[in-house]
Amino acid sequence: MTAGSPLQTLTLAQDLTLTRMGYGAMQLAGPRVFGPPKDRDQAVAVLREAVALGLTHIDTSDFYGPAVVNELIREALHPYPDDLHIVTKVGGRRDEQGGWFPSHDPAALRSQVHDNLRHLGLDTLDVVNLRTPTQEGISDASVAEWFGTLAELRDEGLIRHLGLSGVTAGQLTAAQAVAPVVTVQNLYNLTDRTDDALVDRCAAENIAYAAFFPLGGFTPLQSRTLTDVAERVGASGQQVALAWLLQRSPTMVLIPGTSSPDHLRENVAAAELALPADAITALDAMAA
């Protein structure tokens, strides 16, 4: 992959076209996504390399750091290229020890949107995903109520488009009754296919499905099948896992994160890897 190489794009709205391969900025913060990066200059270099490689999709949140990652993005890339779209998340806060906790009342959501605007140096956020709590028992009605606050902020001109993170199919339906949804960001990868039906639904409705932890998260994907396919196609296992996701659905978008420019280039190169049918069949079987 070289600067200027063509990347597949996905058009979700008249003013929103994303490269299907994006960049997740979470890892630019310190350990446990808290505090400053170990190497600030390298963090800035990674962000600039992402844009140089043609990526127009950067995923972030003001609770990464907190504020650290958004401020790095602003330092590295502001004023932003016209075609660069920054997707952020609200619905959570951090405590002084780096702990995570949900935060969804209207005043809190409004405050989080303004925090993202200020730290990114923007007047309007391209896409804001509502992150739902991970515990069970969150009702469709609750998600619709929280989403309604973001819809009000969209009507006020502070947000262009809305999305969801960590949701069920029912919660997506409830949110859509409030306002259009352009993105869903959920856990999905080669070995965790819980969201198969939702991936297909998003494709049918032209909603971007952003698979987080595409490489297995804190426990990286390891499989003899993955290794065998990688050796056969002359790529790394990581690249194969990313390529499989891109071939899984036409509205799949990826936001793998890294703090290394070399690793970033390796991830982006996966967007050009076309897996043969027999490799797809073998990889599909990994879910069993």
Image: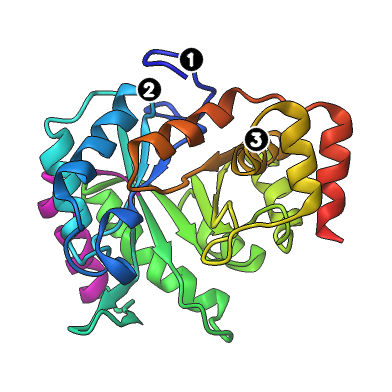
Residue positioned 27% across, 76% down in the render: 93
- Name the image quarter holding the C terminus: bottom right
Question: Is 272 placed above or below 160 here?
Answer: above
Q: Are marks 2 and 1 in contact (CB under 8 Å)?
A: yes
Identify the mark at residue 160; answer none if there is no mark.
Answer: none
Tag 3: amino acid: Ala
Give, as a single range, the part of the protein colored magenta: 107-127
Q: Which residue is identified by label 1? A: 6
Q: Which residue is identified by label 2? A: 54
Q: Are marks 1 and 3 in contact (CB under 8 Å)?
A: no
Q: Earlier in the sequence, mark 2 or mark 3?
A: 2
Mark-to-mark CA distance, 2 and 1: 8 Å
Tag 2: amino acid: Gly
Q: Quadrant of residue 232?
A: top right
Q: Residues within 10 Å of mark 1 (few under 14, many from 20)?
A: some
Q: State the predominant SS element of the stretch in magenta.
A: helix
Question: Is 37 placed above or below 7 here?
Answer: below
Tag 1: amino acid: Pro
Residue in front for this viewpoint, 189 or 198: 189
Residue in front for this viewpoint, 192 or 137: 192
Q: Quadrant of residue 45?
A: top left
Mark-to-mark CA distance, 2 and 3: 17 Å
Q: Are marks 2 and 3 in contact (CB under 8 Å)?
A: no
